[in-house]
Image (cartoon, rainbow, N blue to C red):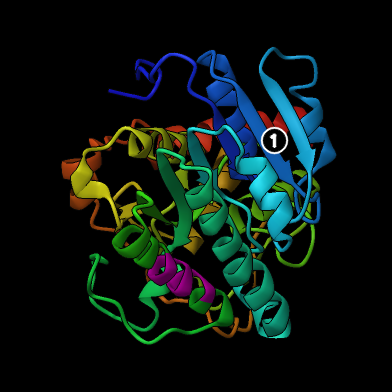
Amino acid sequence: MGYRSLKFPEGSRFLVTGGAGFIGSNLCEALLDMGCPVRCLDDLSTGKQANVDLFAGRSGFEFVKGDIKDFDTCLAACSQMDYVLHQAAWGSVPRSLEMPLFYCANNISGTLNMLEAARRSKVKRFVYASSSSVYGDEAHLPKTEGREGGLLSPYALTKRCDEEWAGQYTRHYGLFTVGLRYFNVFGRRQDPDGPYAAVIPRFIRQLLAGERPVIYGDGEQSRDFTYVENVVEANLKACLAPEAADGEVFNIACGGRERLIDVCRTLTKALAVDIEPIFGPERPGDIRHSHADISKARRILGYAPEYDFARGIAEAIGWYRKNL
């Protein structure tokens, strides 16, 4: 079962932090389509005004421009909310290596602000975005919750800290939290531009422009690519999950693996272009292989991803053809 048939208590109100971003805007859209009131909090540092404008005039949508590093902003945003879907963060492993102080302030202190604001506002559940990067140098596949390795980047450290703080808020303060470890999410509205762009939208943009896509490393590294609709499903099911989910973290993925070289070939074929990739140096902090065990999410959250890689990549290509 997907998320469209989920039933929330009448009048349930949602706060989506980072709602002008890639995943956040998809969450806002899904909730509005389900008839749920949504407040979007975003400072537009990485999110886009265009994503907010998509929902302008829609009944039940409210946009608040604000920074999660400011506690009063977080407290006001949480006021009268039933559920918080906390997506606001700065991503990118390479960028975090360049800006460790900012990542600490934004991703750790900002999340702590949101946890405390949610506690004071007595929200029903606080669902937050974590990352597969927390597995670090743990080589065992598939990646299983509770079997993490040494962290490889400041970004990974921020996400591990978020998980620990959320656990403390559930344990000591009665705030029901659920962490979702995203594995290489892709799909509509993911930014293809800039030096820190994710690999799939970057490949698509380069191929559509007739450019040779750049693969950092030998292309044999693998990822558990996860279409954004699966992530939407996980967030909404986490809101309604049983008590067994509280204070826990869950892998959110498809449970498969795709090599980067194969992804590049798939896109080349789908876009009907004959362009060979360029291979560059490996990037510091990158994990070699990523493959999720999603059995815990299936068992406790009822997570059942509807989109495998083939279906998701077809949807993504269709969107980028129309929007690039």
At x 34% / y 40%, what residue is drawn?
Answer: 238
Quadrant of residue 137 in the image?
bottom left
Q: Please state if 214 lies on the left or on the right of 241 as rendered.
A: right
At x 57% / y 52%, what residue is drawn?
Answer: 117
Q: Secondary structure at mark 1?
A: helix
Q: Please state if 138 lies on the left or on the right of 60 as rendered.
A: left
**Kind of residue at disc 1:** Tyr
Q: Is residue 209 above or below residue 171?
A: above
**What percent of the width, then of the height, locates residue 141?**
23, 70
Q: Please state if 165 lies on the left or on the right of 79 as rendered.
A: left
Residue where numbered disc 1 is placed:
320
Residue 42 forms part of the magenta stretch? no
Near mark 1 (Cα within 10 A), the count class, few <14, some 14-19 or many ≥20, is some
Q: Which region is colored magenta?
A: 158-165
Residue 218 makes an appearance in the image? no
Q: How many marks?
A: 1
**What percent of the width, then of the height, locates residue 96?**
66, 77
244 or 5, which is in the foreground?
244
290 or 234, which is in the foreground?
234
At x 69% / y 22%, what residue is drawn?
Answer: 61
Q: Main secondary structure of the magenta part?
A: helix
